[in-house]
Image: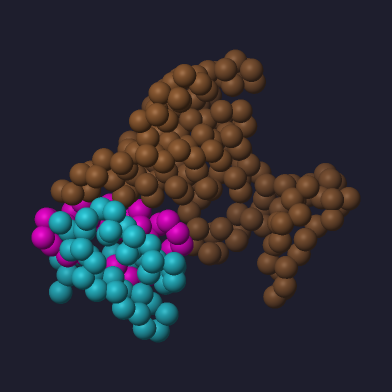
Chain colours: A cyan, B brown
Amino acid sequence: MADAVLDAKGLNCPLPILKAKKALKDVPSGGTLEILSTDPGSVADFEAFCRTTGNELLESSSGDGVYKFLIKHT
Amino acid sequence: MSDKSNAKSMSIIVTKGSLDWAYPPFILSTTAAAMGLEVSMFFTFYGLALLKKDLKLQVTPLGNAAMEMPMMGGHMVMPNAMAMLPGVDAAATVMMKNLIKKKGVASIEELREAAVESDVRMIACQMTLDLFEYKREDIIDGHELGGAATYIDIATKSDINLFI
């Protein structure tokens, strides 16, 4: 179980990233945030977000049109 | 927190103030700020309209050959002879705003607020204020005033410099 869950379904670029950044502020260092999105562009964007910010993308998966990301706050 | 550790920076010169052109600078500035960059936006000429407290942004199909609006399964391009008629801009703006809402795209108001919240520096071009007779109280709080030299100083220290 992630420490926090962000439902960003129905939101388009760049809102999933902006909301994830906000949500990460409340996740302690080492904790995890799960993000649910329906934006296909968020797959590449969360990879890029994590690469630049140094947070760790533990998981990226999809099913039924929903993309799921698990980010470790570092 | 490693969020700020890379301490990269970005500057954007914002020169256009229509609803469509308002998106690229605010999407990029908010996203860059979310990724830990220090961001400065320099609003000049028509771009200064994006700092007004009361945003009345419009989009026009006039002279905009690439503006294809999705309609009834296809796309509609409006001929200039029609696009020039009174009321067309207002109608196109309503259509665009409906699309924006339907597709879960943020409003410019929302993105601008996010930019302010994430400490994006907003610099209003002093010359443009004078030229178009804007008052400082017409534009949002928290802005700074500056000119070309202010921008160049920021640009020389920025990793990314964009002109939009």
Q: Is B93 a magenta residue?
A: no
A67 left or right of A3 in image: right
Q: Quadrant of the C terminus of chain B?
A: top right
B89 left or right of B107 in image: right
**In the figure, B147 relative to B100: above or below?**
above
The residue lying at 60 percent from left, 61 percent from top is B99
**In the figure, A10 relative to B1: above or below?**
below
The residue lying at 85 percent from left, 46 percent from top is B85
Q: Splitting the image into 4 quarters, where does residue B14 fall?
A: top right
Position of residue B89 measured from the top left corner of the image (x, y, whole percent): 74, 47
Does residue B154 show up? yes
Residue at far right of view: B81
Residue at far top of view: B130
Which residues, given as a range, are shown in magenta? Answer: A11-37
Position of residue B142 measured from the top left corner of the image (x, y, whole percent): 39, 27
Q: Splitting the image into 4 quarters, where does residue B9 fall?
A: top left
Q: Splitting the image into 4 quarters, where does residue A61 fall?
A: bottom left
The residue lying at 78 percent from left, 47 percent from top is B63
Position of residue B145 measured from the top left corner of the image (x, y, whole percent): 45, 20
The residue lying at 41 percent from left, 41 percent from top is B160
Position of residue B40 measured from the top left corner of the image (x, y, whole percent): 40, 34
Does residue B53 show up? no
**In the figure, B31 relative to B75: above or below?**
above
Residue at far bottom of view: A64
Q: Is A27 a magenta residue?
A: yes
B48 left or right of A21 in image: right
